[in-house]
Each structure stands twice: as structure tokens, then as C-alpha cells.
Amino acid sequence: MRTVAVVGASLAGLSAARALRKQGYDGRLVLIGDEPHRPYDRPPLSKEFLAGRIGEADLALEADGEDLGAEWLLGVRAAGLDRADRSVRLADGRTVRADGIVIATGAAALTLPGSEGLAGVHTLRTLDDARALRDELARGGRLVVIGGGFIGAEVASTAYALGLDVTVIEAAPTPLAGPLGETMGGVVSALHADHGVRLLCGVGVKGLSGERRVDAVLLEDGRSVPADTVVVGVGARPCVEWLEGSGVALDNGVTCGADGRTSLAGVVAVGDCANWYDPHTGSHRRVEHWTGALERPAAAVAALLAHGATEPGVPRPPYFWSDQYGVKIQFVGHAAGADSVTVEEGATDERSFLAVYRRAGTPVAVLGMNQPRLFTRWRKQFTA
């Protein structure tokens, strides 16, 4: 294999490039990224960076003196994949031919229809998004966050600490019911009320009002929530449009095996765009978490360099964390399918506890709030 192209230059792409070199690949390595920035860390964007506690230099993912011997093509979008001559077509007309290809194009934030061009409306996915939102929050006033997931909750927490008047709107009856289950989703989301942040659940958003700048969020039940700034945190879509017609199987991202292999030989996928097969659940799923983007590329690279001759291992269960209102939230495993959840330590009303999810008596997931040491011990059981 003489040339490997990594399409996507965030954490998953950088992790793949590092794994290539670590596993002995010494050929030409090309990293392609649609953002102009070198790889940076995304989790702090909704917390420390948004609050102004750290700067852009603190986000850098590359170590001092690190040299991957790679060609960096930044600020240019991948426009297509030609399987006949194994080449990646770029939006600026250039073509990169490669023997092996790592797809790491990530995901893009969903937006509200009709919100384009309306000042004061933001999503938070990239460094440029965070810069713009940080400037808006410095104005103060009323912030409305649409979407009660982890990103929305972290933005609400940060804005609350900055002194803004904050409202969170969630269409589902209980925020975070998907990743945490209805009971624990309600417990974690109660952090908003604990700090005087309004949480409106079970109601959808009809639209936004304002001529040039947003002034309110219009709800489907007829209510209007005044807003000086709006953050839309309603999820993300995998960035795989450029692969249409390439022969790479697509279904909620790039369909992969348990080691990241796609339907095309010599092509693997990692990160937020990769819909990996998970033997734990017997189904495919996208894992949009930092840890997955850091760890899973090593397995995909091994499969790529072995030309598919390796046996896929079992991916580690998904792990993620969130910091909200000074509380550390950690989760590992799969809440879906659990038939019970019990608090093993602490108390939910004190916002310091550890809960274990079980299916037929077997632990399948663990949630910790302000229990980092105990959580770490439990997590080791899932990753051994």
C-alpha cells in the first residue's frame, strides 16, 4: 500500500493517521479536511472555550513536535469517491489517488428550516461555530436552547454560569431518554431546574420570529418564548453525501463491520459518520462520542493494512461524559434493552450517585453523577 488518504481531519482522522504510523505504515499519507484548522478538541467547545476559560491554542490535538510525515489538504471538501481508479475528488477540482482510504468526515449539526440568515441563531459543532456563539453570549440577555441533549444541556449550563437567562426546549417528554432511559434521563435533566433554568418538555418548535434578528421561539402549542440568542441542538447528520454513487453502502452513515470495514475493499470508516456493527447489541449504530473517535480507528487501520484478512474484535462499549452545572456525568454501555436500573451508591436527589442498568440480571450499562472513582472501577468491567 503506497498511498493512504484519510478524509476528515478531526479527532477520528488524526487517530487513524497516528494508528497508521504506529502500525508500521511508512508510505504516503494524505489528510483531507473541509475546515481550515488543524485538528482540535471538540468537547471543550460547549464548556471551557465557550465560557472563555481556555483559548484556541488549548484545543490543539497534535502534540508538540509530532510529525506524522503527512500531507495536509485543509479547507477543502471531499466531493466524491471514484472506486474505479480509487481516487477522492475534491471540491476545488483536485484528485487524490490512494490504495487505501479512511472515511472520517464526521457529522454536521442539524438546523431549523427557515432559520437561515436570521441573526442570533446558532448551532455548535465547529470551532467557528463556537467563536460566533461565544461572542453572542458575551452580549448577555435571553438564551433559548432548542434540544435538551448533552450539547444543549452543556451550552445551557455554560450560559447560566455567564449570567444569561436560559430556557431549554425539548420535544420529547423526557430529555436524554434515548441514551440514559426515561428514569435517569429525568434525573440528569433535573439539573436545569436545580439552577433556575427553565425546561419546557413535550412541545415542538413551530418556528422562529424576527425580521433580521431572532426575537422569539414559536412553539407548536401556541406559546412564544422571547429570545435574544437561540442555539439549535437537535442532533447531527452524518456527512456522507459525497459518497453517493461510490459503491460504499450507506445507511445512517457509512455501514461498517465491527472493525470499520465498508462494502468496498480498501475503504474503512471511523468517527461520527461510521455506522459500525456492534456485537453487543447485534445491530449497527453510530457512536458520536470522543472516546470512540480516539480508540476505534486503530482497529479500522489494522483491518485496512491487513487487506481485510484480520478477524474483527469486539468494540469497547460506548463511553461518554458530560459536565453540567458543576456536576460530572459519566456513562458506559447500552441503556436500551435494560430491564432494570438501580442506584448502587449515593442518592439521585443529592445529584451524586452511581446507577447500574441490568438485563436479565447482567450489568449492561453504568451511569455516574459525581462518582468518578466508583464509576471508573465499574467501567473497567466493561472494557476488560
Image (tube, helix red, strand yellow):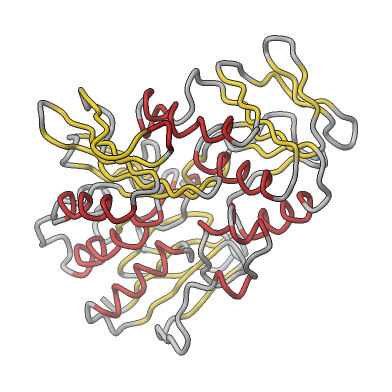
User: Whole-percent x and y of residue 26?
Assistant: 29, 85
> Residue 118: x and y, percent?
81, 38
Residue visible at 18% across and 49% down in the picture:
382
Left or right of 368, for residue 120: right
Picture residue at 79% right of the left edge, 32% below the top: 227
* Residue sitting at x 39%, y 44%: 369
Q: Is residue 26 above or below residue 220?
A: below
In the image, residue 48 lies at what x, y percent?
Answer: 59, 60
Q: Height in image: 52 above or below 170?
A: below
Q: State left or right for residue 120 relative to residue 257.
A: right
Q: Is residue 366 left or right of residue 230?
A: left
Residue 247 seen in this snapshot: no
- In the image, what residue occupies the spot 60% across and 63% down? 35
Number of marks drawn: 0
Q: Is residue 369 left or right of residue 10?
A: left
Return the x and y of residue 379 as percentages of the image width and height: 23, 51
* The N terminus - image quarter: bottom left
- For the view shown, which residue lies furthest in the bottom direction? 65
94 or 204, nearer to the observer: 204
